[in-house]
Image (cartoon, helix red, strand yellow):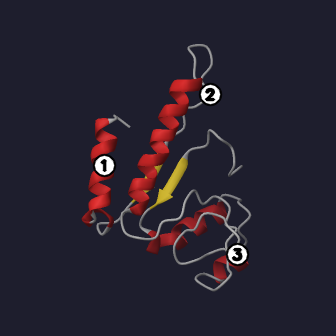
């Protein structure tokens, strides 16, 4: 429920054209994204732009982890998030106290995997056992 909780699982929507799927789930999950904003989908200054955008001065959509625009960008973003989780866990987790242990989930379309950036990110993720 808290989109700023450090150890929350992350969902990255690389297939940004399906952003209404994400916005609908955020609404149903109780995030501060009212039905009126869903009705303003892809309208200027709405909380529901055509592609998910990290909260900034233009969009304040809660629960959005990162901006995904070009095809494959979300795949690479998800790998970056996984790297940061693994590094934080290695630095701060102990045998007695596990602070970091969240998961990163990404939804990507076939177009995302036609871009080189997603292949490079996937190869890095595999090498690092993410």
Q: Indicate the position of residue 91 as horizontal and vertical percent values.
A: 55, 25
Query: Residue 16, relative to residue 97: is it above or below?
Result: below
Residues at circles 1 and 2 in contact by the CB criterion of under 8 Å: no
Q: How packed is label 3: few (under 14 Cα within 10 Å), some, or many (20 or more)? A: few
Q: Residue 11: which disc?
A: none
Q: Indicate the position of residue 117 as horizontal and vertical percent values.
A: 32, 59
- Between 5 and 127, the one nearer to me in the picture: 127
Q: Residue 122: which disc?
A: 1
- Between 64 and 23, the one nearer to me in the picture: 64
Residues at circles 3 and 1 in contact by the CB criterion of under 8 Å: no
Residue in the picture at 64% in, 58% down: 63
* CA distance separating discs 1 and 2: 26 Å
Horizontal side of 120 relative to 101 (left or right) equals: left
Residue 20, quarter of the rendered image = bottom right
Mark earlier in primary sequence (3, 1): 3
- Which circle, 3 or 2, is nearer the viewer? 2
Task: Give the residue at mark 2.
Answer: 99
Residue in the picture at 59% in, 24% down: 92
Q: Indicate the position of residue 127 as horizontal and vertical percent values.
A: 29, 37
Residue 99, quarter of the rendered image = top right
Q: How packed is label 1: few (under 14 Cα within 10 Å), some, or many (20 or more)? A: some
Residues at circles 3 and 2 in contact by the CB criterion of under 8 Å: no
Task: Give the residue at mark 3.
Answer: 35
Q: What element carries label 3?
A: helix
Query: Residue 59, relative to residue 32: is it above or below?
Result: below
């Amino acid at each position: 429920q808290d989109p700023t909780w450090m150890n929350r699982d992350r969902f990255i929507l690389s297939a940004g054209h399906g952003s209404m799927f994400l916005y609908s789930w955020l609404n149903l999950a109780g995030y501060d994204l009212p039905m009126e904003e869903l009705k303003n989908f892809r309208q200027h200054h709405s909380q529901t732009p055509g592609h998910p955008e990290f909260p900034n001065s233009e969009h304040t959509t809660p629960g959005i982890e990162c901006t995904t625009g070009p095809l494959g960008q979300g795949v690479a973003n998800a790998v970056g998030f996984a790297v940061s989780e693994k590094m934080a866990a290695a630095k701060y987790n102990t045998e007695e106290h596990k602070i970091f242990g969240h998961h990163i989930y990404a939804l990507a379309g076939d177009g995302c995997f036609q871009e080189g950036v997603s292949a490079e990110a996937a190869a890095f993720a595999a090498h690092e056992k993410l």
